[in-house]
Image (cartoon, rainbow, N blue to C red):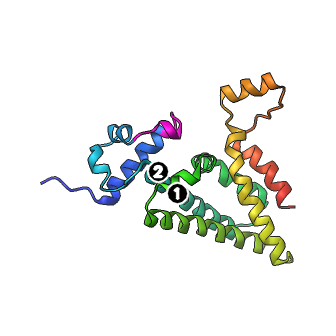
């Protein structure tokens, strides 16, 4: 008798298919039909797990935040140059940064509340871990200043991916408009920004 796959295994298969497609396509172009074609799940069976495409992306985003939390926990327990360690952790989270650059409002608005709460818990864990890292790295920093620094770092994360991965069309437009564009990896750009924010 063949072994039945658990809902967790099926959900992971759906997330992996979504991630694969998102690596080749834009958010707006990925459909549940295409995700289904990349899995052993029929399109109707995907709806047993996710009601919308946005829910799939939101769950993928949650998974990325939880992976980053693992890195943040290691950073919190390690000694070293904080901007360097954080930049290295972000270098591994290209997907998370790309998802940050997408319209989060649409993902959240088109997801059920329980999916959104689960995502917010993962996000909240990353914020709490990052706050703890800042508290340990800068123990003399007043709470208000630490909070301002935390908010600045979180806002900074939204812009890293687009700067590191400008599309050919964006580069062509910047060249035509005479706008300077600096090429750099996620690591390089993160390190520059984090060094400024964490002085």
Which sits in the foreground, 199 or 44?
44
**Quadrant of the frame with the N terminus:** bottom left
Give the main secondary structure of the magenta stretch: loop
Mark 2 and mark 1: span between their CA atoms? 7 Å
**Quadrant of the frame with the C terminus:** bottom right
Residue 199 left/right relative to 165: right
User: Disc 1 on helix, strand or loop?
Assistant: helix
User: Disc 2 on helix, strand or loop?
Assistant: helix
Query: For the residue carrying disc 1, how many other residues have a C-alpha within 10 Å: few (<14), some (14-19), or many (20+)?
Result: some
Residue 125 left/right relative to 86: left
Q: Which residues are magenta?
A: 22-31
Which sits in the foreground, 141 or 112?
112
Is the residue 106 above or below the residue 174 in the image? Answer: below
Residue 27 spot, x, y in % from top left:
52, 41
- At a point 38% along the width and 48% down the height, the residue shown is 14
**Is disc 2 in contact with disc 1, using a CB cutoff of under 8 Å?**
yes
Query: For the residue carrying disc 2, how many other residues have a C-alpha within 10 Å: few (<14), some (14-19), or many (20+)?
Result: many
Which sits in the foreground, 6 or 31?
31
Residue 45 spot, x, y in % from top left:
27, 50
Judging by the rendered image, the residue that carries numbered circle 1 is 108
Residue 117 visible in this rendered orientation of the protein: yes
- On whether residue 176 falls in the magenta region, the answer is no
Judging by the rendered image, the residue that carries numbered circle 2 is 54
């Amino acid at each position: 008798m063949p072994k039945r796959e658990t809902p967790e295994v099926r959900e992971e298969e759906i997330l992996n298919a979504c991630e694969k497609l998102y690596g080749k396509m834009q958010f707006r172009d990925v459909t549940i039909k295409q995700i289904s074609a990349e899995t052993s799940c029929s399109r109707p069976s995907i709806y047993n797990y996710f009601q919308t495409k946005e829910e799939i992306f939101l769950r993928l985003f949650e998974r990325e935040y939880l992976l980053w939390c693992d890195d943040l926990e290691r950073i919190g327990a390690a000694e070293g140059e904080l901007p360097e360690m954080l930049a290295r952790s972000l270098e591994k989270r290209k997907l998370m940064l790309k998802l940050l650059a997408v319209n989060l409002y649409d993902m959240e608005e088109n997801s059920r509340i329980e999916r959104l709460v689960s995502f917010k818990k993962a996000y909240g864990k990353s914020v709490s871990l990052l706050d703890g890292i800042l508290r340990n790295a800068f123990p003399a920093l007043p709470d208000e200043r630490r909070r301002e620094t935390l908010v600045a770092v979180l806002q900074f994360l939204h812009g890293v991916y687009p700067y590191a991965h400008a599309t050919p069309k964006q580069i062509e437009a910047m060249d035509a408009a005479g706008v300077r564009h600096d090429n750099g990896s996620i690591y390089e750009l993160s390190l520059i920004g984090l060094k400024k924010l964490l002085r």
